[in-house]
Amino acid sequence: MTSPTYSLVNDQTGEKVALPLVQGTLGPAGADVGKVYDKLDLFTYDPGFTSTCSCKSAITFIDGDKGVLLYRGYPVDQLAAHSSFIEVAYLILHGELPGKAALEEFETSIRKHTMINESLKRFFDGFNYDAHPMAMLTGVVGSLSAFYHDTTNNRDPKHREIFAHRMIAKIPTIAAAAFKRFFGQPFMYPQNHLDYCSNLLHMMFAVPAEPYHVDPVAAKALDILFILHADHEQNASTSTVRLAGSTGCNPYAAIAAGIAALWGPAHGGANEAVLKMLGEIGTVKNVPSFMAKVKDKNSGVRLMGFGHRVYKNFDPRATIIREQCHKVLKHLGKEGDPQLELALELENIALSDDYFKERKLYPNVDFYSGIIYKALGIPVNMFTPMFAIARTVGWVAHWTEMVAEQGGPRIGRPRQVYVGAPVREYKALGAR
Ligand code: SDX
């Protein structure tokens, strides 16, 4: 069967522009509209990028209708069941699952870069003790661009690799330092004999005054959560990293831009917003009045952790996280956690309610993750930093994929439909 062809036609003049297809491996093809402005003096208009591809990528595939998420072709549920976050990080970065030697070499390199420059620690003193950890992450990660002058050639694969390893290795150390700053406790240095997630838990919860033993169930739960949050195609924060990186800027600065974008409650900040929402609802008996507010457009209230731009079915990550919720809470003797019960009741009600069904609103990755984080003793304001730690792998991989393109990236520069004032003459002050 021959591939369909597409074109754009000016119905008045009959002028026609062919739209060549950019075919992918899976999912819809893209119609290349790059010549439309030149040929028809016409822009394409898609403010939320609902139907617009910004690039080609081989990293992650999502089928929103079927609730499918693949990292380099591997279903995320299989990776969550059988892999580890550090192995998934290698896969997302390099495109293939590593052999034993490659995995050991990668993991050793990450462990060797977990410490941050001692002078970076003074940056945290500049923040008020109650600064949001995401504000600290954004500032401190951006300042990494002031420390590494030995690897600033984005066109050099070795420089790109050392950036990738440093960024993935240091983000947990920086996040844990933000956590310690917030609680007024001394920073804990990374312990390189620990695996990635155990090291993070150690840096967050250990204190110099006594030994700290990482709960392996907690570390494993975190590892699975990080696998599920590692990448997600061209989401807002990843697109931010790509757009910033397309200018050729310092890669640490591009990651800081991604952290800033992730912070929003419509994006990675939703996990924190879900727990605040559950707190405001309080008990199951308040669910009907809350749902009435959600359906009232004038209230501005949304069911946080529900809905997704791409998933119009279950977010496969939410299903796995819900299962993990039960396992972790059972292990910690916190079964029957009232907020988990409330979340399950909210989900049941929403999934049988026409308002949500008509709009294809299902639980997303953020609906249950906060319940696990809270059960692990992680405070609400650290939920989005947890998301940022995991998504750093995706951000670094997308930056690398873009920068390594033949000839380097073309700067991203969207156009606009101008709706402002027409041309007019300046008026002297006295004439206004
Ligand atoms: C993440 O892009 C990614 O991949 C992101 C992410 C990743 O891994 O990177 O998956 C992570 O950000 C997950 C999403 C976390 N955000 C939230 O949970 C916040 C609550 N959800 C929403 O605000 C919303 O669903 C979005 C932002 C996620 C998606 O917004 P869209 O695609 O722009 O949808 P929309 O705002 O146009 O809504 C369509 C309709 C509207 O109703 P109508 O005007 O058609 O009557 O659905 C309604 C919305 O009012 N709606 C909701 C709702 N989400 C959408 N109504 C109530 N509660 C909600 N949560």
Image (cartoon, rainbow, N blue to C red):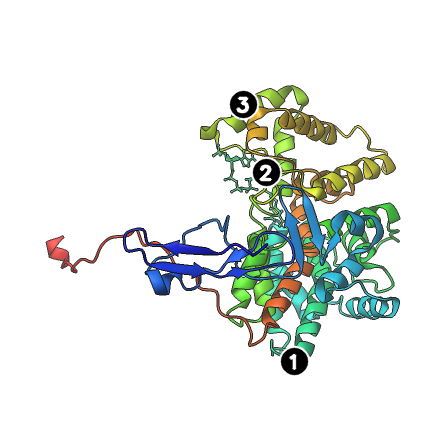
Which structural element holds mark 1?
loop
Q: Nearer the viewer, residue 55 or 126?
A: 55
**Ligand 1 closer than 8 Å to the CB at disc 2?**
yes
Under tag 3, what secondary structure?
A: helix
Q: Kindly identify the residue that appears in the image at 88 percent across and 66 percent down.
A: 100
User: Is 213 situated left or right of 1 in this image?
Assistant: right
Badge 2 is on which residue? Answer: 307
Quadrant in the rendering for residue 72: bottom right
| 414 horizontally vs 334: left or right | left
Give the residue type at disc 3.
Answer: Ala
- Tell me the kind of residue under disc 1: Asp
Q: Nearest to the eye among marks 1 and 3: give it.
A: 3
Query: In the depicted view, which residue is nearer to us: 218 or 414?
Result: 414
Precedes in sequence: disc 2 or disc 1: 1
Residue displayed at 58% across by 75% down: 406
Give how far across and how far down residue 7 sits, in percent: 43, 56
The amino acid type found where label 2 is placed reads Gly
Residue under pointer 1: 150
- Residue 169 in view (yes/no): yes
Q: Secondary structure at mark 2?
A: loop
Residue marked by disc 3: 292
Alpha-carbon span between mark 2 and mark 3: 17 Å
Mark 1 burial class by Cα count in 10 Å: few <14, some 14-19, many 20+? few
Residue 217 location (% of width, % of height): 86, 46
Q: Position of residue 371 (x, y in %)?
A: 73, 38
Q: Is residue 280 above or below residue 402?
A: above
Quadrant containing the N terminus in the rendered view: bottom right
- Pointer 2: residues within 10 angstroms few (<14), some, or many (20+)? many
**Looking at this rendering, what residue extends furthest in the left direction?**
431
